[in-house]
Image: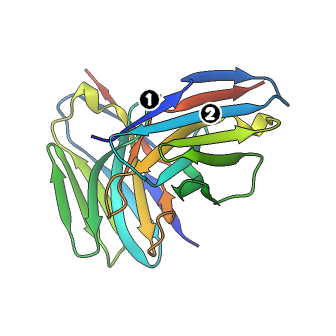
Amino acid sequence: KNQVEQSPQSLIILEGKNCTLQCNYTVSPFSNLRWYKQDTGRGPVSLTIMTFSENTKSNGRYTATLDADTKQSSLHITASQLSDSASYICVVSYGGSQGNLIFGKGTKLSVKP
Amino acid sequence: SQTIHQWPATLVQPVGSPLSLECTVEGTSNPNLYWYRQAAGRGLQLLFYSVGIGQISSEVPQNLSASRPQDRQFILSSKKLLLSDSGFYLCAGLRDRQGTQYFGPGTRLLVL
């Protein structure tokens, strides 16, 4: 069964600290993996996208890694800011159809001053 | 740039009433469009996607339907709402060939 599991479910950190969010997937055939940021009450916004051959991708203070062998991805946030408070969603696409996307439930990150 | 518009932002409807949520796109033509539902504490669930006018694919059997009357318009409807239809509804378009999507602001629906 195609699944995307994210951990932790929620996380609270102090402003300026780093954190790492995890995504494990059992999706086949794997096409690519994306991380989205979703502010409360808003639509998700794409942060990074990685294909099978990519191990790491950065977007400012966000760095995503992908281990296709273990089917794990992580999103590392450096020097967190209050505006990083949001849900972070891991999305894995499979096959070639546009509709083949599996969404994780997300990790809710709260950055406190 | 491509932009998704959705309205209303919030909607409270009684059980058994009809529903019509509208999504429009600007900045692109013939986009692939998607309707998602996000229930509290759960991930995004793909409901429908459309590759063109009049072309709708349904991902899950449900109380909802979708229509694509115009190239840049995607409508989500129901004849009779259920309590379980409550949730956050997001419309999305396809940004690139790798499948990255851009999302609208969403509509929060509460069925009482």
Question: Which residue was labeled with disc 2?
Answer: B21
Amino acid type of disc 1? Thr
Residue sitting at x 74%, y 57%: B61
> Nearest the camera: B90 or A113?
B90
Q: In the structure shown, which secondary structural element does the residue marked by tag 1 occupy?
A: loop
> Nearest the camera: A79 or A94?
A94
Q: Position of residue A77 (x, y in %)?
A: 22, 44
Q: Position of residue B84 (x, y in %)?
A: 75, 39
Badge 2: chain ID = B
Please say whether residue A64 is visible from this viewpoint: yes
Q: Position of residue A111 (x, y in %)?
A: 30, 29
In this rendering, the answer to whether A32 lies above or below B42 is: below
Q: Quadrant of residue A88?
A: top left
In the drawing, what numbered circle is on residue A40?
1
In this rendering, the answer to whether A110 lies above or below B30 is: above
Quarter of the image where the C terminus of chain A is located: top left
Residue sitting at x 32%, y 79%: A69
Residue sitting at x 75%, y 51%: B62
Q: Is residue B90 left or right of residue B96?
A: right
